[in-house]
Image (cartoon, rainbow, N blue to C red):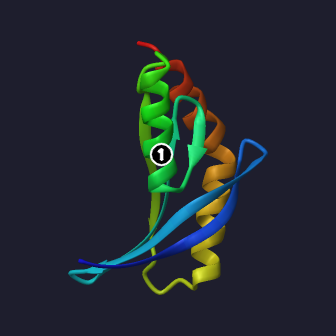
């Protein structure tokens, strides 16, 4: 697989969030993936900030609840704008549920 990436802004539960993006190409398949980190209820797209949040939470006794959240869709012959719209609509609809599930697991 070959991957190229970048960043984009999106909205989850009415809140803006910066996401990492990646286009994955291999074996005749093209995927557009967006991902971010969820660390004890905080979101970040930065690897470094995610590690800092995790270390800080462990040092202060808050635990190390964390996840990487990845959403993706096939690209086929769709234009980038159509793919972005599909993922944006999915995040608008499912983002609050994803966040609620993650928050429900905290401290278990």
Which type of secondary structure does the marked residue at label 1 adopt?
helix
Q: Which quarter of the figure is the N terminus placed in? A: bottom left
In this view, the residue in front, 31 or 67, is: 67
Residue drawn 64% across and 80% down? Answer: 81
Q: Residue furthest right?
A: 14
In this view, the residue in front, 48 or 72, is: 48
Image position, residue 73 (x, y; %): 46, 65
Image position, residue 57 (x, y; %): 49, 26
Please tell me in which quadrant of the rendered image residue 103 appears.
top right
Q: Which quarter of the figure is the C terminus placed in? A: top left
Q: Is residue 56 left or right of residue 84?
A: left
Q: Residue furthest front?
A: 59
In the image, residue 33 sits, relative to residue 106, either above or below, namely below
| Location of mark 1 (residue) | 50
Please tell me in which quadrant of the rendered image residue 84 appears.
bottom right
In the image, residue 99 sits, relative to residue 59, either above or below, namely below
Image position, residue 22 (x, y; %): 44, 72
Image position, residue 72 (x, y; %): 45, 61
Circle 1 crowding by C-alpha within 10 Å: few under 14, some 14–19, many from 20: many
Residue drawn 66% across and 69% down? Answer: 85
In the image, residue 95 sits, relative to residue 107, either above or below, namely below
């Amino acid at each position: 697989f070959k991957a190229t990436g970048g960043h984009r802004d999106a909205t989850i539960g009415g809140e803006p969030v910066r996401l990492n993006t990646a286009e994955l190409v291999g074996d005749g398949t093209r995927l557009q993936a967006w991902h971010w980190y969820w660390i004890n209820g905080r979101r970040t797209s930065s690897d470094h900030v995610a590690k800092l949040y995790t270390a800080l939470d462990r040092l202060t006794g808050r635990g190390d609840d964390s996840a990487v959240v990845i959403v993706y869709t096939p690209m086929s012959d769709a234009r980038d704008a159509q793919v972005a719209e599909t993922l944006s609509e999915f995040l608008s609809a499912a983002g609050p549920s994803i966040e609620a599930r993650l928050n429900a697991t905290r401290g278990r």
